[in-house]
Amino acid sequence: MLEARQHSGASASPLLEVAGLEAWYGESHILHGVDFQVREGEVVTLLGRNGAGKTTTLKSIMGIIGKRRGSVKFEGREIIRASSDHIARLGVAFCPEERGIFASLDVRENLMLPPEVRPGGLSLDQIFDLFPNLKERLSSSQGTKLSGGEQQMLAIARILRTGARFLMLDEPTEGLAPVIIQQIGRTIARLKSEGFTILLVEQNFRFASTVADRFYIVEHGKIIDGFANADLGANMDKLHTYLGV
Amino acid sequence: MNIQALSAQLLVGLINGSFYALLSLGLAVIFGMLNVINFAHGALYMMGAFCAYFLLNLFGIGYWPALIIAPIVVGLFGILMERSLLQWLTGLDHLYGLLLTFGVALILQGLFQNYFGSSGLPYAIPTELQGGVNLGFMFLPIYRGWVVIFSLVVCLVTWYLIERTQLGAYLRAATENPTLVRAFGINVPRMITLTFGFGVGLAALAGVLSAPINQVRPLMGADLIIVVFAVVVIGGMGSIMGSIITGFALGVIEGLTKYFYPEASNTVVFVFMVLVLLLKPTGLTGRAT
Ligand SMILES: Nc1ncnc2c1ncn2[C@@H]1O[C@H](COP(=O)(O)OP(=O)(O)O)[C@@H](O)[C@H]1O
Ligand SMILES: [Mg+2]
């Protein structure tokens, strides 16, 4: 069935199309031609060892890596040369690995910070429905005083307000307790059911297998393999080799 | 104790404190966003006063419109300065911005000195604010009272804008992590430019306020800015309320010193600076980084 969906999806152009993407930090060449696609409504996960280039891939798509080359198309539009504020305004939202909660802003200000880029973002009620803890912490003085899990929820919640329908989440479960990981898993599933498209980076492959439609394996700044969640069993041995687990 | 003389010195202190606060506030806002210690701030303050002078003597435009026009004109000059010079220093050490703005200050002051000499040009107090009131314990010139109150209001409005509004949240967030704020869809480079223009506008506003009190001189800012930098060191860069309070407080302390121990009135601020640097190098309200 997934095969059929992939075929039908192949005729329509994907929501995100990355081809031959290269990126540099100063002199060091990090991405060496990354190719992959994300179709509308999918949850796609990039897996790979530490330092493989997953975060750099997301940042390159978001336009926050200074030197990048190749092609990134969003909704068919080339954005490899666009500035990150422009890319955000097209409806691409990014939740960074380090979460990026602002210490000089209180919780409410953190939540309200990203401007609306398109109509149809989640309302505050919908957000508090997803993350009830946030509502209680709203009047907290400093965003960075929240627990790690609450900071992660705040980091996801604030980009849901903006109306962006394509979310890039960089290791949202990193360092969190199992109950919170479950809550984030439920959130991702719910967002997917509401039609959001999600590009996820994960080290926690067990978590990823509960939410993702497809996986790509990143190694040394390239995509070296990819398969659907349905084919996970058949690819288990390969996967262990790739991830070294 | 001579109450009359004491309150007169207190008033002088409050007036000076108003200028310290307006100028160090602009410096703090600029430093937060651009990471630049703007040594041209005194020269831009001087340009504000000259702008008011030109408006009056070339176009017959008086004090009240000048209060709005001069900050805008000089603020636009600041924007030009940021776009043409400062933006290229992004990511470099503080020292580059400091040297560049110091150079700009020397050029501006040199140009004005070349054309207008070093003596002061008069600028009259607007008729509405002439005269004074007898408060019983002292005689208060209305213009001076106006400067203190107006400066305080401008400082508090700026504080409110930065600490309590959405625009201010963008500013604070961009001070912390400009890359991420930009990735949320905010045009951070434009915000940086406008912030510089705003800080410069505050300096120019202080210049207009000062014109009727201190006359209009090419070096009026050069003398003042040294004290203002000491104020900034004492208050700590990057705190809005800190620079406002420190500005007014040090003006008052200077005034009190003038009454109780006049010999030290020119050095008291620097003594404070040394003490603060020894005891708390990040400044009284500064955050350790
Ligand atoms: N800011 C940076 N400057 C220089 N090199 C970096 C920077 N960030 C990451 N790298 C390097 O780029 C490579 C890929 O990093 P990253 O994309 O963060 O990996 P991943 O997210 O897959 O763990 C690593 O070798 C890392 O050391
Ligand atoms: Mg990473």
Image (cartoon, rainbow, N blue to C red):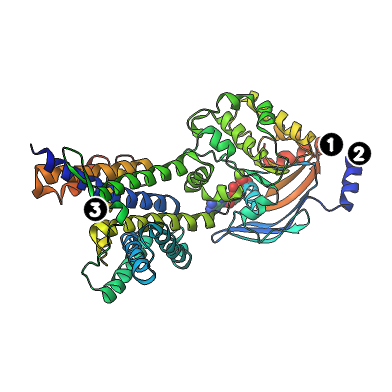
Disc 1 designates what residue? A230
Q: Distance between the residues labelled 3 and 1?
A: 71 Å
**Residue A36 horizontal side relative to residue A171, left or right:** right
Q: Position of residue B7 (x, y in %)?
A: 17, 41
Label 1, secondary structure: give it.
helix
Q: Judge whether A71 appears above or below B267 on screen.
A: below
Q: How far apart are marks 2 and 1 (CA)?
A: 9 Å
Quadrant for ligand 2 reads top right
Tag 3 near tag 1, CB within 8 Å:
no
Q: What residue type is labelled 1?
A: Ala
Q: Judge whether B190 appears above or below B270 on screen.
A: below
Chain of the residue on which disc 3 is drawn? B
Label 2, secondary structure: give it.
loop
**Residue A14 horizontal side relative to residue A28, left or right:** right
Earlier sequence position, callout 2 versus callout 1: 2
Name the residue at the bottom extreme: B114
Q: Where is residue B164 in the image (x, y as percent from the top left)?
A: 48, 39
